[in-house]
Structure formats: C-alpha cells, structure tokens
C-alpha cells in the first residue's frame, strides 16, 4: 500500500490532490447542466477566453485565478452583448470571441522568457504548483458554486427541462440563465489550475455524459457525475505521478476511460433485447 | 366595478414574433368555466395565441386580461400543455418529478414538497391513469402516456385556465378519452379550458364554444353559430369543399408542420 502513501508525503502533492478533487466534483456537477442544456461549446469557449486574463496576471506577477475571474466575466458579458440584438448568432459570437481571446493570450505569453513551460502550464494545468492561497480560493469558490446549485435546484431543473412551464410560473428565466452562465464561468476558472484551459471543457462534459448514460434522474446524475469526477482526479493524479505525464491529461484520460466503459456497458445491455 | 369581470378577455390584441404580427386585432371574451375549441388552418396562429396567453410572447398592441387583471398580475393561474415535440423526452426526470413541477408555486423556491403536495401529485397521477408509472423515466413512456403525464401536471397546478395545444393529434384512443374525461372534471371544477384541434367534428360536438382563427378572428360563439359555410370558407379557403348535398368537407389532414 506504500505506493498510495508515497506521493502524499510531499506537501505539494497533498495540495494538488485536494485541488483536483474539488475541481473534479465541481466541474462534474456543473457539467450536468452543461450536458443537458447543450452548453458544451460555451464551456470550451469560456475556458479558452480566460487565457489573456491569466497571461496578464502572470506578467504583472498577480494571482492567476483572479486574472482568470476578471477575464471570464468580461467574456461572458461580451457574448451576451454581441448576440443580444441578433446581429450575430450566439455560436458565431462565441467562436469569434474565443479565438480572439486565445490568440491574444498566446501573444501575451509569447513575450515571456520561459514561454514554452508557462504556456503548457496554463494550457494543461499544473496541479503541483497549487499554492495555499490557490487552494483557499478554489475551495471558497467551489463551495459557493455548489451551494448555489443546491439552493436553486428546483428553478434550474424547471428552466432546463421546460422553459414554457418556467414562463407560466413567472420564473425570472433570463436572470436564472445568466446566473448559470456566471456559475459556468467561475467553474471553468477554478478548473484552470488542475486541467488547464485546454482540457476544462472535457472535465465539464465527460463525467456528466457518463452519468447521463447510467442514471435517469437529475439528482442521482449529479451525485454519480461528482463521484466520477473525483475518482478521475485521484486516479489521474497517481497516474501522472508514476508515469511522469502531465496531470491534466492523465485526469481527462481517466474520465474518458470511465465514459468508454459506461458506453460499452450500455451498448452490451441494450443488445439482446432490442429495446431503446 | 359594477359587473363581474370575465375570466379571460382579449381586447384588440396584435400578437406575433418580433416585428412580425401573426394575429391581428383579436377581441373575444371567454366566460368563467367555458370549454373552448380553437380551430383554424395550420399556421393560423393557434399556438401563437396560446403562447401569448401564457405570457411567452408579448402582446404588441391591445391587452389580455385574466379576472380583469393583466397577465403579469397572476402567478400560476394558467396551465399550458405543450405539443409533444416541444419537450426534451431524454431529460433525466421521472413521471413523478414532472408532475411535482406543477406544485412549484405552492412550494416556493427552496421548500421541499409538503404532504399536501405529494397527495395532490398522487391524485393527479391516478386521475390520468398513470399512477403505476410514477417512478418510470419519461423516456420510457409511449406518446399517449407522455401526454397524460403532462395532463396530470396541469391538474396538479390547480389552474383557473388550462390551455392545450393539439392534445388529440397523434395519440391513442385511451389518451383521447382520458383527455375528454379530464375536460368534464375540469368543467365541474369551474376551470376554463381552451384547446386547439384539427378535428372539427370533435370541436363542434364536445365543446361549448368555438374560436375560429385565420390570422384574425373569423368567428367566435356556440358551435352551431360558428360551423357555417361562410365562416369555414373564410378560415380554410381552398381547403374547403362543398359537396352536392350541401355538406362541407375541410381538407385539414396531414398539414405540414409549422412553427
């Protein structure tokens, strides 16, 4: 059993593991709405759009998470602004903004001397570089997001499943939808540290999609998704430690393996009785 | 106020999407507890009317009053049963979950369902004959069962006005009967019901009032007043054939899907 303990003797590994588990759970829970409401492209775009904020924070020697939060909020609001008057379709607006932000981010990072290393950390995460402050920010934001999702479970369920009912019930649908966008942006920001901007979308979508295959109610889907997210983070981090590969990739590939297993199981199950 | 307000009043209303107006200058009053069939050719604006009554579409001109008050003054007094294509049937919810959503306004945002809520959900489910399905996922149900689940949800809402968009199209006989039985129960409970349908026979035989639409109000009144050749010709135009013996055939079958 010493192979389980050994990595944890390092303090940076403890912090890294804790951060990955928080991010795994958070992304997975938020991810259920991303999957059910078809917001995967938006999640991916937000993740990339954060890059310039991170780069600027890095250049100014500020905190990367705070730079990311500022960038995410600006981008989320701009997407709303561009697509509001209907001049540009929403997915077109997302596509333009996310490519531009990514280009700006890379341009800024390319001015740094340690360009290659820094870029790879930002793109694919650097779990082992999680500071105590990062961990506090991650936990705080994570708790806030999970609490909001928990408290607004019923209205979020109704606006996602049946927007018409939401309207007849006079729910503030526009407000709730924007709140969900902000929660998504914050989730992406938090996941930056562990899986990076390149792979945040995978952590949002993959565990939730796996849980979608195996459950038939929203609450169990969230719980299973969170469990899978946490397990992917733990297994992924150990894989990364022993195989010496980038932690973000290891975590995402573990989550993908869970998905493939669930997919195969579902397929095998539906084979004998041709029932859909 | 000297007179009791009508339950539902539409006054000179223009309704549409964006700049486009689908329904022009609509005026009618539905008395308390009446059962109204909304008929007209495809694309005549039946769904548009319902969306405006629910509050999904703004009224461009004129106004809609319920119990003498504007739409936004009410919470949860209108229940709407959407066409089945409008619902994501792969969403992970059970039958019980869906019907419980109808109790949202009675529970508020944060409270859990009360004993009373649960009782009402159970009663609604058994009234629509789907009590044994309550734990099933909605994706497992047949089309008719899915519709009865939504009827049960509308019941659980305890509305004053119930709107149903094409509940008789593409469902089995059991569901049609369950829907008609529900309408009888609703009449007893003084609930006003407006139902859009393609079935003119059903509309004229089972409803108190008919509302004939084609981008404007063609006729509104008792079925024998509305079902006149001149009205039908105005509404259906070339889809109308007058047979030699004077009877009228409306070619209303299999219309193309619109909005």
Image (cartoon, coloured by chain):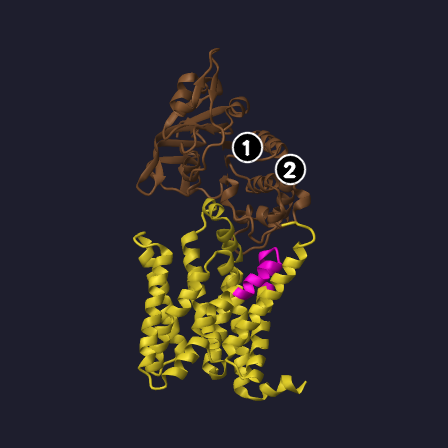
| Residue at figure coordinates x 60%, y 64% from the top left | A224
- Residue B85 picture location, percent across and down: 51, 43
Callout 2 secondary element: helix
The magenta region covers A206-224
Q: Colour of chain A?
A: yellow
Which subunit holds the residue at mark 2?
Answer: B
Q: Is residue A210 magenta?
A: yes
Asked if one can make out residue A152 in the rendered structure from this viewpoint, the answer is: no
Dot 2 corresponds to which residue?
B127
- Determine the main secondary structure of the stretch shown in magenta: helix
Q: Distance between the residues labelled 1 and 2?
A: 18 Å
- Closer to the camera in the image, A74 or A124: A124
Residue B175 horizontal/vertical position (percent): 61, 35
Which chain is indicated by disc 1?
A: B
Instruction: Return the residue nearer the eye: A270 or B32.
Output: A270
- Quadrant containing the N terminus of chain B is top left
Residue at horizontal 58 percent and vertical 84 percent from the top: A242
The numbered disc on residue A229 is none
- At horizontal 67% and vertical 54% (from top left) the residue drawn is A271
């Amino acid at each position: 059993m010493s192979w389980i303990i050994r990595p944890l003797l390092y303090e940076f590994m403890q912090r890294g593991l804790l951060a990955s588990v928080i991010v795994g759970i958070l992304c997975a829970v938020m991810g259920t709405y991303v999957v059910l409401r078809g917001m995967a492209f938006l999640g991916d775009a937000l993740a990339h759009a954060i890059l310039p904020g991170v780069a600027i924070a890095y250049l100014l020697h500020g905190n990367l998470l705070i730079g990311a939060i500022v960038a995410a909020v600006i981008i989320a609001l701009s997407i709303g602004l561009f697509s509001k008057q209907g001049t540009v379709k929403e997915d077109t607006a997302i596509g333009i903004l996310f490519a531009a932000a990514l280009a700006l981010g890379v341009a800024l990072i390319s001015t740094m001397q340690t360009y290659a290393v820094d870029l790879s950390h930002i793109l694919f995460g650097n779990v082992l570089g999680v500071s105590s402050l990062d961990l506090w920010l991650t936990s705080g934001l994570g708790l806030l997001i999970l609490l909001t999702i928990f408290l607004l479970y019923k209205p979020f369920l109704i606006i996602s499943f049946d927007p018409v009912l939401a309207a007849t019930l006079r729910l503030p649908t526009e407000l709730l939808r924007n709140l969900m966008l902000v929660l998504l942006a914050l989730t992406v920001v938090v996941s930056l540290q562990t899986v990076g901007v390149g792979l945040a979308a995978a952590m949002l979508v993959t565990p939730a999609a796996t849980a979608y295959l195996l459950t038939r109610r929203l609450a169990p889907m969230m719980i299973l998704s969170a469990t899978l997210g946490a397990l992917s983070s733990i297994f992924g981090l150990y894989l990364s430690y022993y195989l010496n590969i980038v932690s973000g990739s290891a975590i995402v590939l573990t989550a993908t393996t869970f998905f493939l297993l669930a997919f195969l199981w579902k397929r095998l199950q539906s084979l004998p009785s041709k029932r859909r | 106020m000297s007179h009791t307000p009508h339950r539902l009043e539409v006054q000179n209303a223009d309704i549409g999407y964006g700049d486009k107006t689908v329904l022009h200058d609509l005026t009618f009053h539905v008395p308390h507890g009446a059962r109204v069939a909304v008929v007209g050719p495809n694309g005549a604006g039946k769904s548009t009317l319902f969306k405006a009554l629910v509050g999904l579409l703004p009224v461009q001109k004129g106004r809609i009053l319920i119990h003498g008050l504007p739409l936004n003054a009410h919470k949860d007094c209108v229940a709407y049963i959407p066409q089945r294509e409008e619902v994501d049937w792969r969403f992970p919810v059970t039958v019980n979950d869906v019907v419980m959503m109808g109790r949202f306004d009675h529970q508020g945002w944060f409270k859990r369902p009360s004993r009373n809520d649960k009782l009402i959900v159970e009663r609604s489910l058994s009234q629509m004959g789907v009590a044994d399905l309550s734990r099933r996922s909605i994706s497992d149900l047949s089309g008719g069962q899915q519709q009865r689940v939504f009827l049960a949800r509308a019941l659980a809402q305890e509305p004053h006005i119930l709107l149903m968009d094409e509940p008789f199209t593409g469902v089995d006989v059991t569901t049609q009967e369950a829907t008609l039985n529900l309408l009888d129960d609703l009449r007893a409970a003084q609930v006003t019901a407006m139902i859009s349908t393609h079935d003119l026979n059903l509309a004229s035989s089972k409803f108190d009032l008919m509302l004939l639409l084609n981008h404007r109000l063609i006729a509104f009144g008792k079925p024998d007043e509305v079902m006149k050749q001149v009205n039908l010709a105005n509404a259906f135009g070339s889809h109308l054939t007058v047979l030699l013996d004077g009877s009228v055939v409306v070619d209303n079958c299999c219309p193309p899907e619109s909005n």
